Structure formats: C-alpha cells, structure tokens
Amino acid sequence: MNVFNVAKAAVSAKDVAAFCGIKINRNNMCLCPFHNDKHPSMKIDKRYFCFACGAKGDAIDFVSAYFGLGLKDAAIKICDDFNLSYDSSYHHPPQNIKPKKSDEQIFKEANDYCFKVLSDYLHLLKEWKIEYAPKDESEEWRPYFCEALNEISHVEYLLDILLYGEVSDRAFLIQDYRKKVIDIERRINEHTARRKANDKRFSRMHGECR
Ligand SMILES: [Zn+2]
C-alpha cells in the first residue's frame, strides 16, 4: 500500500489530534486548532469537522493543516509518528516542523510591528520638531520640521486606533499602511545609522582636541 492508504487505513483524525496534544472530550469534541476556539467546536473521530470555521478532513488533512505540510509529507509524517511501514522508493521525513501560525498570531504580530514602528516614528518626529525648528522668521522651514508638523497628530491618531480601536479598524489600518510602515522603518533605521556615524565622528574630533 502507498503512504496515503497506509496512513488513512491505520490512523484517524482523532489519533493524530491526540498525538499533537489536543485534548478530546468524551463526546469527541475538541478545541479547533484552526481558529481561535474558546469552547470545543470541532467534532473529531475518523474525520474532523469544525462547526465554527468549517475546517474538515481526514487524518492526513489534519496533519497537513496543523503543520503546514503538503499532503504527501503529512502522510509520511503520520507513518513515521505511528511506526507504520509503507511501500515507497522515496522517503525523507520532513524536518524542523513548526505548527503553522494561526491567523490571530499573524494579526497580533502585524499589529505589534505597526505599533512599534509608528511609536518610534512619533518619537523621532517630536525630536525633529525641536531640532529642525527655524531659528528665526527669515529661515526657511526645513523638510524634517515640515514633516513633523504634518505628521505628528496623524501618527498619534493611528497609534490610538492600534491601541484602542475595533479589530476591524485595526485590520484595515494594518492593511492600508503596510507599505508605508515598512518604508518608515527603513527611514528610521537609516536615520539612526547616520546619527550613530555622526556621534562617532564627533567623539573622535572631540578626542583629538584634547
Ligand atoms: Zn475551527
């Protein structure tokens, strides 16, 4: 028998879920690992079905979705984990498998990333507002100063949404500002590197004067 038939015949979705450490109650219900489940929504036996998110399939589908593997690698993993032998000329067990990140995790990381970059940016803008402020009325406004004036309240508003907004507003913001945030992060890094280089030059000059 090939690897698919062996895995399917010998092992149920319930077996592989239990193997992954998922607790299954007496009614064959468990917390669904494929959405943020608070009360057991997944019916699991030979196959599985989640009443909340609609995830469904057999043992191979379960392992495939849980570990982010292709179906063949999932079947091979089942045979390895449960010591099943199968006919195959090719056999390489997948290595360093990490469970796939949940949507919630991905969202949280994106939210945290946006928040961090925008807070750093706000901090920098507030510095620029002072550092690059015109010394007198005749001096032309410098770009950093203008940027600070233009952006400070807008960035404060975005941070407010990321911190206190509805999930849908935050998701929209993250989606909308993805490219801009990456660009801001790049500018912050460049700015910090330039500043460090200047500081070094300054302290070297300072050292030579002594
Ligand atoms: Zn589910």
Image (cartoon, rainbow, N blue to C red):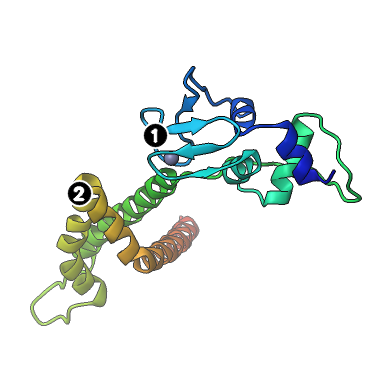
Seen at 57% across and 37% down, the residue is 47
* Secondary structure of the residue carrying numbered label 1: loop
* Secondary structure of the residue carrying numbered label 2: loop
Q: Which residue is mark 2?
A: 165
Quick check: is the Cβ at mark 1 less than 8 Å away from ligand 1?
Answer: yes
Seen at 43% across and 43% down, the residue is 105
Q: Split into 4 quadrants, where in the image is the N terminus?
A: top right
What amino acid is found at the position of numbered circle 1 in the picture?
A: Asp
From the viewer's perspective, is 89 left or right of 179? right
From the viewer's perspective, is 205 left or right of 52? right
Q: Nearer the viewer, residue 155 or 26?
A: 26
User: Percent from the top left, x then y, of residue 21?
Assistant: 58, 25
Image mark for residue 118? none
Cα–Cα span, label 1 and label 2: 22 Å
First in residue order: circle 1 vs circle 2 = 1
User: Percent from the top left, x then y, of residue 53?
Assistant: 40, 44
User: Percent from the top left, x then y, of residue 3?
Assistant: 80, 44
Quarter of the view holding residue 157: bottom left
Q: Nearer the viewer, residue 98 or 63?
A: 63
Quick check: is the Cβ at mark 2 less than 8 Å away from ligand 1?
Answer: no
Pointer 1: residues within 10 angstroms few (<14), some, or many (20+)?
A: some
Seen at 45% across and 56% down, the residue is 203
- Residue furthest out toward the right: 89
Seen at 60% across and 33% down, the residue is 46
Image-quarter location of ligand 1: top left
User: Percent from the top left, x then y, of residue 204?
Assistant: 49, 59
What amino acid is found at the position of numbered circle 2 in the picture?
A: Gly
Q: Which residue is mark 1?
A: 37
Q: Nearer the viewer, residue 3 or 156?
A: 3
